[in-house]
Image: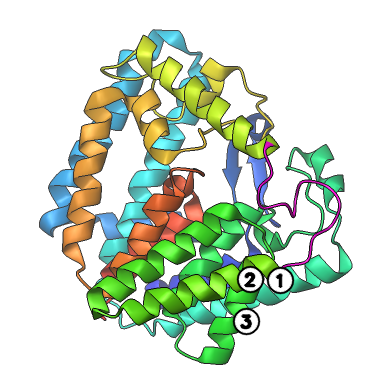
């Protein structure tokens, strides 16, 4: 009974995104209602840990802990506590898989969640197109871009693409795609294309990929443009900023290539503002793993990803998983809590 209530609350709170959140230690630790429920559910799931995922999860968890232990004298007790809390968060989120393995869940629940996110996104786009006022709360300012409740077009777009892949109803699928398009997120467009390339491969239908390409090209042509860089798909400012971020990650890795600087200690090395919502991670999940856990951590994490890939052979899951991985080269998608939640639950569901 408790599990059913928590599952209900988990899905109800998902569309709240980043709107309702509690910050501790000057913003270094963030907890959302959805986080809290996911952590409790995940904790229950860890009592059921078994099967092919057990060893890869233990190895990756060990690598995260080891990276922090090796660097224990480089950080203050508070910094170590913050980093350790995010290690615990990842471990607890993985427990969602073991909970949902034993639950019969209608996959349409994800589609309905995305529908709510898309509707809220269009409300924001139409009535609050200029969200530059969010800069005072350390969020990136955007103008005429759909950011919805996640307050970020990149992550909102990624979630919506996952919804498009799952949706069967053509009207809902089109609506979710349109919402994704208005994020003007180049990474989301690429993720969309990759997802449909995988679906086309598994269905042995080149037509699926051609249609996806055609739809995307027409969308890029017809999307309205406003002044400023936000709606320019060939904007250079964010591109160079991302390249600079990648270079920083590689420089950090070069100083500690074997064990890294310690999982989730990235902000302390880069001296990023503690209140920044983007300062805790790199603009690439793989580079973040490499910089914070070193070669040992990267090997353990890639082993975990390989196991996840083998665990669910359904083309919908593999398309979603591949899309997330590709998006993670440009945003820290693999460690975004809402994407992690989606991925672990989807992995557990039979198709």
Q: Which residue is mark 3?
A: 175
Q: Marks 2 and 1: in contact by CB < 8 Å?
A: yes
Tell me which residue sits at (44%, 88%) in the image.
168
**Is the residue marked by circle 2 packed among few (<14), some (14-19), or many (20+) residues within 10 Å?**
some
- Give the structural element (helix, strand or loop) at label 1: helix
- Residue 219 is labelled as 2
Tell me which residue sits at (47%, 81%) in the image.
109
| For residue 308, side relative to residue 6 (left or right) | left
Q: Position of residue 120 (x, y in %)?
A: 72, 72
Disc number lying in front (2 or 3) = 2
Is residue 48 visible to the viewer in this orientation of the structure?
Answer: no
| For residue 33, side relative to residue 225 (left or right) | left
Asked where in the image residue 279 lies, by quadrant, the reply is top right
Q: Which residues are magenta?
A: 223-236
Disc number lying in front (3 or 1) = 1
Whole-angstrom CA distance, mark 2 to mark 3, is 13 Å
**In the rendered image, which quarter contains the C terminus?**
bottom left
Q: Nearer the viewer, residue 283 or 235?
A: 235
Q: Position of residue 226 (x, y in %)?
A: 84, 57
Q: Nearer the viewer, residue 38 or 236?
A: 236
Q: Is residue 286 above or below residue 335?
A: above
Q: Nearer the viewer, residue 52 or 164?
A: 164
């Amino acid at each position: 009974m408790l599990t059913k209530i928590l599952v209900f609350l988990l899905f109800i709170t998902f569309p709240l995104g980043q709107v309702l959140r509690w910050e501790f230690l000057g913003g270094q630790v963030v907890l959302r209602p959805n986080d809290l429920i996911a952590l409790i559910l995940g904790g229950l799931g860890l009592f059921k840990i078994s099967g092919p995922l057990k060893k890869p999860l233990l190895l990756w968890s060990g690598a995260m802990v080891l990276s922090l232990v090796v660097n224990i004298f480089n950080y203050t007790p508070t910094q170590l506590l913050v980093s350790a809390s995010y290690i615990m968060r990842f471990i607890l989120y993985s427990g969602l898989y073991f909970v949902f393995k034993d639950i019969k869940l209608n996959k349409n629940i994800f589609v309905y969640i995305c529908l709510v996110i898309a509707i809220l996104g269009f409300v924001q786009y139409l009535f609050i197109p200029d969200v530059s006022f969010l800069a005072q709360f350390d969020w990136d300012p955007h103008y005429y871009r759909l950011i919805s409740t996640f307050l970020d077009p990149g992550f909102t777009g990624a979630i919506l693409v996952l919804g498009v892949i799952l949706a069967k109803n053509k009207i809902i699928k089109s609506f979710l795609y349109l919402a994704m398009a208005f994020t003007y997120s180049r990474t989301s467009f690429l993720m969309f294309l990759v997802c449909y390339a995988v679906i086309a491969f598994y269905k042995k239908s080149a037509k699926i990929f051609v249609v996806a390409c055609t739809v995307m090209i027409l969308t890029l042509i017809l999307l309205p443009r406003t002044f400023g860089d936000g709606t320019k798909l060939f904007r250079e400012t964010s591109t160079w900023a991302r390249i600079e971020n990648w270079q920083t990650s590689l420089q950090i890795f070069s100083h500690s290539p074997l064990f890294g600087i310690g999982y989730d200690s990235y902000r302390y090395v880069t001296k990023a503002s503690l209140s920044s919502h983007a300062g805790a991670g790199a603009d690439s999940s793989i580079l973040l793993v490499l910089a914070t856990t070193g070669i040992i951590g990267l090997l353990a994490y890639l082993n975990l990803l390989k196991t996840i890939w083998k665990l669910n052979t359904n083309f919908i899951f593999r398309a979603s998983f591949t899309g997330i991985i590709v998006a993670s080269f440009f945003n820290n998608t693999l460690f975004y809590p809402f994407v992690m939640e989606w991925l672990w639950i989807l992995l557990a569901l039979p198709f």
